[in-house]
Amino acid sequence: QVTLVESGGGLVQPGGSMSLSCVATMNIFRPNAMAWYRQTPGEQRDLVARISPSGTTTYVDSVKGRFTVSRDNTKSTLILHMTNLQPEDTAVYYCNTNPPLRLWGQGAQVTVSS
C-alpha cells in the first residue's frame, strides 16, 4: 500500500521558520525524485521544490534562497525547511513523487500571519 504522510505545519509569523516532514512508503520513495507542492484555495497545486534520488535540488523562483529540501533514503523521509516565511507562503503543503502519483496525502497547513 502506498502512503504519503505529511507533518509539521502550523502558524508562524512573517519572517519565521518552519520545517515539514513527509514519510512515504519505501517502494515509491527510494527510486523516485520527490517533491513538495503547495495549494491555496481555488488554485491548482504547484511544485515548490524537487530533489532527485541522488540529491540534486531545484526550486521555484519564489522560494529560492529561503526553502531547502532534503531527503533521507534510509528512512524514506522528505524534509522541507522553510525560512523567512511570508504571507504568500500560506498554503497546504503536500509531498509526492515528481511527476506526482494520483495518490496524495492529507497535506500540512502552513499559515504565515502576524
Image: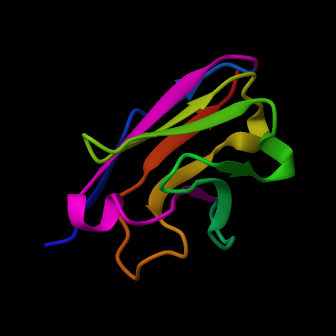
Quadrant of the drawing holding the N terminus = bottom left
Extreme-right residue of the structure: 61
Residue 71, image x and y in percent?
Answer: 44, 41
Please tell me in which quadrant of the rendered image residue 41 appears: bottom right
Residue 30, image x and y in percent?
Answer: 34, 58
Task: Give the residue drawn at x 53%, y 52%.
Answer: 92
Q: Nearer the viewer, residue 41 or 60?
A: 60
Q: Nearer the viewer, residue 38 or 33?
A: 33
Extreme-front residue of the structure: 54
Stretch in magenta: 15-39
- In this rendering, is residue 1 above or below 107? below
Query: Is residue 25 a member of the stretch shown in magenta?
Result: yes
Q: Nearer the viewer, residue 75 or 89?
A: 75
Task: Give the residue drawn at x 66%, y 73%.
Answer: 44
Query: Is residue 46 a member of the stretch shown in magenta?
Result: no
Residue 67, image x and y in percent?
Answer: 68, 34
- In this rendering, is residue 33 above or below 77? below
Quadrant of the drawing holding the C terminus = top right
Extreme-left residue of the structure: 1
- In this rendering, would 85 be left or right of 32? right
- In this rendering, would 53 be left or right of 37? left
Residue 54, image x and y in percent?
Answer: 51, 50
- In this rendering, would 12 be left or right of 102? right
Task: Give the residue drawn at x 67%, y 65%.
Answer: 46
- In this rendering, would 61 be left or right of 45? right
Please tell me in which quadrant of the rendered image residue 103 appears: bottom left
Task: Give the residue drawn at x 86%, y 49%.
Answer: 61
